[in-house]
Image (tube, coloured by chain):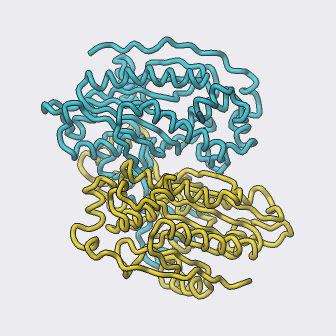
Chain colours: A yellow, B cyan
Amino acid sequence: MESLSPAPTFCEPLDDDGLAEPTFLDRLFDQGLLVRTGVDGLYGRSGAFESVVEALDRLIGRLGAADNAEVLRFPPGMSRPAFERSGYLKGFPNLAGTVHSFCGHEGEHAKLLACVEAGEDWTAGQRATDIVLTPAACYPLYPVAAARGPLPAEGRLFDLQSYCFRREPSLEPTRMQLFRMREYVRMGSPDQVLAFRESWLERGTQMIRDLALPLAIDAANDPFFGRAGRMLANNQRAQGLKFELNVPVNSVEKPTACLSFNYHQDHFGTTWDLVQADGEVAHTACVGFGLERITLALLRHHGLDLAAWPEGVRRVLWG
Amino acid sequence: MESLSPAPTFCEPLDDDGLAEPTFLDRLFDQGLLVRTGVDGLYGRSGAFESVVEALDRLIGRLGAADNAEVLRFPPGMSRPAFERSGYLKGFPNLAGTVHSFCGHEGEHAKLLACVEAGEDWTAGQRATDIVLTPAACYPLYPVAAARGPLPAEGRLFDLQSYCFRREPSLEPTRMQLFRMREYVRMGSPDQVLAFRESWLERGTQMIRDLALPLAIDAANDPFFGRAGRMLANNQRAQGLKFELNVPVNSVEKPTACLSFNYHQDHFGTTWDLVQADGEVAHTACVGFGLERITLALLRHHGLDLAAWPEGVRRVLWG
């Protein structure tokens, strides 16, 4: 397995004015680009904001078009049995969102309404459904791919996008609880999936450069839960399984992961009995694009007025 | 207040072949247009299916473009306090989906994983967050609009679209638990909002005719919960507050509401202290488009091969 050679990195300083009060988030609210809902990390988006998200989504599609990925779109919730089997609860129990519903009759309904009226907790009677919010665009995919039987010799490539949920309320606009992730997912041999990841390290870096954003590619780890999680995180980083393309958005010290490049080894293949054409367990890799995060990076570096963005950037986005 | 005069209606018979085994849903799975997840009403969508959803979304935008609606996009979850105040729990407690999360430490995490491992219920420790799944695209809008103060004299018009959740598992492909709703919402005087609804009854009818689908416009009611709900439903229907544009999809006897035209009177205005320029409580109305439902109607009537759809329909959708 060849080692990865990330593209050379650079990182320009942020204009410090942007970090003073009002905060970047305040300015996004003031301009109406994001809309307050009263919940940190849960925002409405303006038409202008959405026009950037949509342009990025199309741009990523163009960059990947030659690969002929199979397009699948899943809703923002997934099957709970599939979620349980995925192993997400081992690593990130605190980030998951389960969907619960009311199963009572009229008597219980009257009590529920009395609780709401009195400002008391009415949620104790809610029961877990068989749906969990999607934590990453690729999670619903693996069981679907495995159900098709062994991979063909050339493996498979999927193109995904969905709203994802992570329970981490924050005042950093780049850390939303509900956000959209575009993803390409490659399944096949270790060589196939590593070559895929390598190609997207190049394409993704070029894309962000074309958008005139400063960037750095860094080895990274997922935010595994608890003390045991720290070891997982260290292993992941040491083995070069995860790289992130970081752009300073909220601060220079803590830049924001806008793209991530992940080699899962045989984790999902083993979990889902997904095998290659020769019967060997499949390896998988994905590249994920944080559509809101890249949008916020563009707004942070090029300003809140889209019409005033550099002509070259506008051309990349809108032709 | 003038009475509504819905457009003349007609309804052609469905080709009976489509109702025999395999069911329409089975055929959608077989063709890969929808993808099984193991949960009824929760499906993946193919690229072809999505291309229709996207074309419909753009078509609706073109039909409404002259009105210069303000575009806002909310994620598929909304603030729980806003949801509680909205009154949704009075009418539809059984359809709501609350989002719950794990708040424990490592000891509780170990127990949770042991439950998952043993196939036991691990969700008892999940706690309700301040997020509820969006039940209709307009629900997050009202508090946002009210926070801006009194409406201008001409009122306001919003353009919304989001994934919505309704807890009603079903094998009818038109009854999904997570689906997308495009909506225009008008706020103003009774005359303003009724004129808006009238104009969309015409536009919506013409749109569905242009798509060569049979339709009927019918007085309708929301599926209010319980015995008390039946009275609400009867009142809503008798007062002509809700019309639906129905297209036979699963059957001729129970056609599918693909568009709905709703006059809320002062319900949301009173709930959210939303007032007109003169201080009178605002009235609201909305037109909602079920994007998956219209897509399914097209697939049902024009066939599962998009390339073989009537040329006129393809031109309406893709120019």
Could you say which is closer to the camera, residue A53 or residue B275? A53
Q: Is residue A154 above or below residue B151?
A: below
Above/below status of B291 relative to B200: below
The N terminus of chain B: image quadrant:
top left
Residue A202 x, y percent position in the rendering: 61, 73
Q: Is residue B149 left or right of residue A259?
A: left
- Tell which of B314 and B159 is nearer to you: B314
**Residue B237 in sight:** yes
Residue at screen point 69% across, 76% down: A265
Write the residue at 65% across / 52% down: A71
Which residue shows up at 28% across the image and 35% down it? B156
Q: Residue furthest left?
A: B278
**Residue A69 point in image, percent of width and height:** 69, 57
Does B307 sit above or below residue A301? Answer: above
Q: How many marks?
A: 0
Q: State left or right for residue B215 relative to residue B105.
A: right
Q: Position of residue B318 (x, y in %)?
A: 60, 35
Query: In terms of depth relative to the viewer, which is nearer, B39 or A46?
Result: A46
Whether residue A169 is visible here, answered yes or no, is no
Q: Is residue A71 above or below residue B60?
A: below
Q: In which quadrant of the rendered view does residue B69 lie?
A: top left
Taking the image as shown, residue B151 lies to the left or right of residue A70, namely: left
Q: Position of residue B99 (x, y in %)?
A: 43, 56
